[in-house]
Amino acid sequence: MEKKDKDKDKGYNRRSFINNGVRLALGVSVVGTAAFTLQRSASGKDYVWQIDPFKCTQCGRCATECVKAESAVKCVHAYALCGYCDLCGGYFKPGAKLQTGAENQLCPTAAIQRKFIEEPYFEYIIDEELCIGCAKCVKGCSAFGNGSLHLQIRHDLCLNCNQCSIATNCPSDAISRVPASEPYIIKGNFTTEEES
Amino acid sequence: MLKKIPNLALILILFALLTGSFLQAQQRFPKPEFDTGYVQPDPTTPEPRAMALEYFDVLVLLAVLSLASWLAVKKRSRRGLLWLSVFSLIYFGFYRDGCICSIGAIQNVALSIFDPGYAISITALLFFILPLLFALFFGRTFCAAACPLGAIQDLVVINPVSIPSWIRKTLGFIPVIYLALSVLFAATGSDFIICRYDPFVGIFRMDGPFLMIFLGITFLLLGMFYARPYCRVFCPYGVLLSWMSKFSKWHLSITPSECIKCKLCKDSCPFDAIEVPVEQAYRTPEVSRKNLKRFILYIGLIPVLILLGGWIGSKSHIFLSRVHPDVYLAELMISQPELKEDEENLDIQAFLESGDTFEQLVDQAAVIREKFRKGSLVMGGFIGLALGITLMNQVVFRRREDYEPHKGDCFSCGRCMDYCPIDSQKSKGESQKLNVESLKLKVENQKSVKSKG
């Protein structure tokens, strides 16, 4: 009986020794991995997802690929770049009458409001409640106008997923992580363009 | 107005030459000059969620892990763990929309190890290491109360069925393959498959693609009978936690003092994670010799399995590399050159517009494929090694006299603690000893009655 107890103790001592050793090794490897990645990433800054409007090819996937049923991507109007044209390539369908009827509008949800400012200038305002991020207006504006309409990820809507599901499906690699301190790339802000 | 246009064009050309971006800045129309003094508005830029709140998430995780470990190991309260898991489900699941989570953080760590250009956020890193470190000391208390995916499945366990050991062990090997694949795809920068096929994130957000919601509901329905299906059959983080937990210093114990082998706990575990005592009968010389032979055979098999896994891995690297969009695109354009004319194919049209040459794309794809060749080799070897060790563990019988939780598989949910008849209130003192003696007698009596009958 006594011998058995001794054996048992011996067994347990050996096992606990192995256990302690392995635990130390595992702990060191976990902390080591953490230290390695941390030293690699150096800055430790926080990042959010954003579309580079200069790379965007207006493929329309932003409207469908976002994990949210209503995409976090919306059209943004860089007013500073806009020509305030009467005949807006982003507002009217090509060849359509210059009337604001829905059949003449490019936007499938009528999310662009056309506001008269003064002769001959009109301002185009995006209603984000209605905008689905389909980029039809962006395509029109880039093709016929100054390209002041462009897509941006709206951070009040974006969930900042670990991996942006639009980014993996973007054909032109336009979506990438940007520092959270500068979460938007607004066109017409030429300082941003020079940096990129 | 017309006069201004040439001027503007000149300025633009100069500007484009300076910045080297002639294609991008096309200012066809001049800036309007408002007579009424109208001032153009600025576009709104709503701020992202404050980063300080992300550090708060880490603090919440730390608090939940500490509390869960205390509840599982020291306080022994199933009820406490249950309510804590409900809190985690609400906070990390429904309030924080299930992102960032420790399971997905594997990929961030893998990517930041292999891609120096990728900067991992401190939050993701801490979400990755904290549960592992806790598992190293207290067992898988993360699974018990901190993981929202675990919590939602734990709540729907209604009528769990016991599964034969060989099926469980075979299914339990899938997470190893899933882990290896997700690390491979993350490290090569192809895709984050854990996030893409996360079954519950759609439910947490009450929004998402059809497949995500469908998977989530399927898993929940299945989980009524096969408890925690995602945790046991898919969760890649569970593999890491299980390794840590196997060597945990303090792990939840079923009984507060001495096990009387009443078997009550065995039926309480919905995950078949309680190990029965290894009886002396299994330890006869013949059985031991047979096991020793098999043990030596399996040890010898490990290098063979590693080589075989590596060979299969490197054979499949071409297939696996197609997950990367660049490789996929290059292959598509080589195999079907006529698609270049296809206006509908967005990927090819976007590539043609980008101005990169076809050779650049092919070179890029070749570099990625080379990464996949190395990665798949290592991945296959790793899977082979894991398979070998799993096989080897089948014939290692440790002396076990009591009913104990399987430290690797146990989620520390604490159901078994409630079923143990040993009164934890009086776990110290003389009365407990008497209690144990009387219970032992009772069980002995039952056994003798059975054997007589």
Image (cartoon, coloured by chain):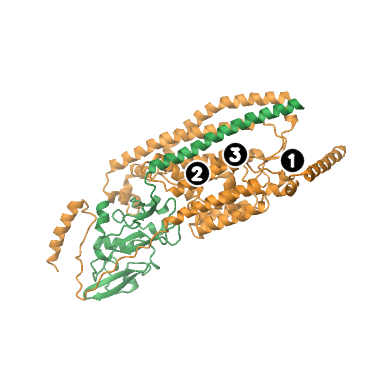
Image spot of residue B328 (x, y percent): 38, 44
Q: Which residue is mark 1?
A: B259
Pointers 2 and 1 within a single chain: yes
Q: Which residue is mark 3?
A: B248
Q: Which residue is mark 2?
A: B129
Mark 2 or mark 1: name the one nearer the start of the chain.
Answer: 2
Image spot of residue B12 (x, y percent): 17, 58
Q: Is residue A123 above or below residue B15?
A: below
Give the secondary structure at mark 3.
loop
Mark 3 or mark 1: name the one nearer the start of the chain.
Answer: 3
Mark 3 or mark 2: name the one nearer the start of the chain.
Answer: 2
On the question of residue B227 being in view, the answer is no
Rendered hue of chain A is green
Q: Residue B363 sits in which quadrant?
A: top left
Which numbered disc covers residue B323? none
> For the residue carrying disc 3, how many other residues have a C-alpha within 10 Å: few (<14), some (14-19), or many (20+)?
many
> Residue visible at 59% across and 27% down?
B298
Image spot of residue B317 (x, y percent): 43, 36
Image spot of residue B16 (x, y percent): 19, 54
Q: Amino acid at mark 1?
A: Cys
